[in-house]
Amino acid sequence: MTASLPPAVRRLVFATLVNTLGNGLYFAIGALYLTRAAGLSVGQVGVGLTVAGLVGLLTSTPLGTVADSLGPNRAYVGFLILQAITMTALTQVRSFPVYVVIAAVTAVADSGQRGAKGALIAGVSPADQRVRTRAILRVATNVGMAVGMGLAGIVLAVDRREVYVIALLANAATYLVTAGLVRFGMPEVERVSAATGPSALAALRDRPFLAFVALDGVLSMHAAMAQVAIPLWVATATDAPRWLIAVLMVLNSVAVVLLQIRVARGTERLAGAARAGRRAGLLLAVACAVLALTDVTSGAITIGLLVVAALVHVIGEMLQSAGGWGISFELAPSGAQGQYQGAYAMGRQVGDMVAPLILTTIAVGWGWPGWLLTALIFLTAGTSIPIAVRRHQRWSGIQQKPEEVPAA
């Protein structure tokens, strides 16, 4: 998979594997550590995560400019080190206020590293290979997360504070190892001079780009659909066995590992990326429509429909990711990849914040009419992405052949 990649990209893939292994470990144990070992209530953890989400959203684009001005390598390494510090500090949490402060600083570091990593990918990958690099990194992320969550099973089985603390420190160590892999052995991507680069926060004045970000954020609700809405639907609204929930999640992960790179082909340019966004909306809508059918079916038919819905959903998910990567890279002006990648991440952040409430209320709560309304939301967002891209081309003065970006 990585043999044909430039050495710098191969190193970034390995760094991603290390980083996400630690992330997977913490993802599986974090909530239990905070409630069982640190003594926080479930409500306090929820408030802390909400605060962190808002802080991350507000700082995403401004921190992206840091990557442009300092250089992606330095910024990425700096934010990784900050994440190592906050993860270590988390082992000392004893009170709610301290947790909120650490969660907020962690959100700053996480937002900063997202923009910096996006700019780093743009800097070390040839322009026509950026989306493929993103696809490979997503595969590496899934593999690393899976291994980390597997290791978390040992921690959860022991269920003792000192073991949770060791796991958190291990995650902190992965940030430092990742920082070392990026700092030593990767070519330095040049920083952008303030005199020659776009003005700070130009991305936040780019209204057509922000329209795309908002639409992509709507499509990104597929993550909560897979992690929250579908499991709840299977467990509460169908007669399917509950073990099917695990099967559907494994199916999603395996499909991404096997197919993401292939699905991303053709999304390196705006035409293919916009087309992928439109198709993603259509497929996610189809998945919702299939789920609506399971409200009135039973037995083997329901199981079969749920599997079909999961397969259609994951293809739409992969198309949304690839299309979003391609559009975000292509619409960013020279010298502003950091802030544009930071702004692009805002869509996913908003989607992650609002999707659980929207999907549980509408799709799961309302039954088949809710799923059909959710389908309409996905279909509208996907159909509108080519429109947003064409408007950006007119806004920025890019000259394209009329047929290059598909019509809605």
Image (cartoon, grey):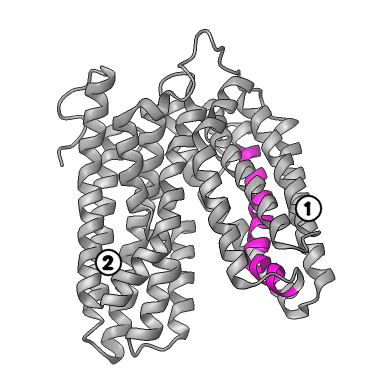
**For residue 16: magenta?**
yes
Residue 253 versus residue 364: which sits nearer the camera?
A: 364
Instruction: Please indicate, yes or no, whether residue 242 appears anywhere in the rendered image.
Output: yes
Q: Hey, what amino acid is under mark 2?
A: Ala
Q: Residue 334's image quarter?
A: top left
Q: Residue 42, position in %: x, y? A: 61, 72
Comparing labels 2 and 1, the label whose residue is closer to the camera = 1
Q: Is residue 65 above or below residue 197?
A: below
The residue at 67%/61% (across/down) is 26
Residue drawn at 32 percent across, 86 percent down: 238
Q: Identify the residue position indicated by label 1 in the image.
A: 89
- Identify which residue is drawn at 60% across, 18% down: 191
Q: Which residue is mark 2?
A: 287
- Binning the other alpha carbons within 10 Å of mark 1 as few (below 14), some (14 to 19) or many (20 upward) gives some
Residue numbers of the magenta segment: 10-36
Q: Which residue type carries mark 1?
A: Ala
Number of marks in the rendered image = 2
Q: Could you tell which of marks 2 and 1 lies nearer the N-terminus? A: 1
Q: Position of residue 161 (x, y in %)?
A: 81, 72
Q: Main secondary structure of the magenta part?
A: helix
Q: Does residue 266 appear anywhere in the picture?
A: no
The answer to whether mark 2 and mark 1 are in CB contact below 8 A is no
